């Protein structure tokens, strides 16, 4: 059983398009996150949701919007994609302290 | 806010030798310090963690130490094996403030057979 899953694993798209990445966790965790990992492997927090409320929103462009239909899902919507959005995006979830990551989605914007 | 620094950024060791990765943090309120291993093409995986009421924790070949006074914590891997090659991240968390995690910049470890 996959604890934190993401789809798709790879996403190649043209500049200006709108895309979504889905994330699901079956751990019963209260908090979910989205991270962006650039080519230098730096992990940057983008959003986190706790009980469907946004509790962290770092300085990311408003083209990025997290949407949580329920506690087990946190999807990431990206509008008007730009070349600089190319990266690996990781979903994660946590309860109390332990945080678990999904396998990542490699986004390539052409 | 919290600032976590991690060194070195790259580390090469011979198989069987030990590897040490060090991190420092700035916020004395941080009370949980996990370490993650990221293999190529995969997400970071929690390998060991330590809480602020403990000075050292060991799990087989890996151990973590915490010095609260100096605000630094370290990962120690003994008897390294080629499969230990990966990127390792340290992190700090203040569990009372909504599960915010602050990550170090990562260490790429290569174990040479």
Image: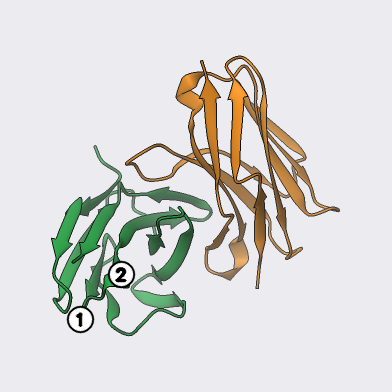
Chain colours: A green, B orange
Q: Which chain carries label 2?
A: A
Res. A13 image quadrant: bottom left
Q: Is residue B19 visible?
A: yes
**x and y, in percent, of residue B36 in the image:** 51, 43
Picture mark count: 2
Q: Is residue A32 visible in this depiction of the protein?
A: no
Q: Which mark is residue A80?
A: 1
- The residue where tag 2 is placed is A85
Distance in Å between CA atoms under marks 1 and 2: 10 Å
Tell me which label, 1 or 2, sits earlier in the chain.
1
Residue at the image point whose x is 55% and y is 48% from the top: B106
Q: In the displayed structure, would residue A106 be above or below residue A61? A: above
Is the residue A65 above or below the residue A8 in the image? below
Relative to B31, is B13 above or below? above
Residue B45: image quadrant is: top left
Q: What element carries label 2?
A: helix
Residue positioned 48% across, 20% down in the render? B82
- Picture quadrant of residue B17: top right
State left or right for residue A13 relative to residue B45.
left
Residue B43 point in image, percent of width and height: 37, 45
Where the N terminus of chain B falls, by quadrant?
Answer: bottom right
């Amino acid at each position: 059983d996959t604890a934190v899953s993401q789809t798709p694993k790879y996403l190649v798209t043209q500049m200006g398009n709108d895309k979504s990445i889905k994330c699901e966790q079956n751990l019963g965790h209260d908090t979910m996150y989205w991270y962006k990992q650039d080519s230098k492997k730096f992990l940057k927090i983008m959003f986190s949701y706790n009980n469907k409320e946004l509790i962290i929103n770092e300085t990311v462009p408003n083209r990025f919007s997290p949407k949580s239909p329920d506690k087990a899902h946190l999807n990431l919507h990206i509008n008007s994609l730009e070349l600089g959005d190319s990266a690996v995006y990781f979903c994660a979830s946590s309860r109390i302290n332990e945080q678990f990551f999904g396998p990542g989605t490699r986004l390539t914007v052409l | 806010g919290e600032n976590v620094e991690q060194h070195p950024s790259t580390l090469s060791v011979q198989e069987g030798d030990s590897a040490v990765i060090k991190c420092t943090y700035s916020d004395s309120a941080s009370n949980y310090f996990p370490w993650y291993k990221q293999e190529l093409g995969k997400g970071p995986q929690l390998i060991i963690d330590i809480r602020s009421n403990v000075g050292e924790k060991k799990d087989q070949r890996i151990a973590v130490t915490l010095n609260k006074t100096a605000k630094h914590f370290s990962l120690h891997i003994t008897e390294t094996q080629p499969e230990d090659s990966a990127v390792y991240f340290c992190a700090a968390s203040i569990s009372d403030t909504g599960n915010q995690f602050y990550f170090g910049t990562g260490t790429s470890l290569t174990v040479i057979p």
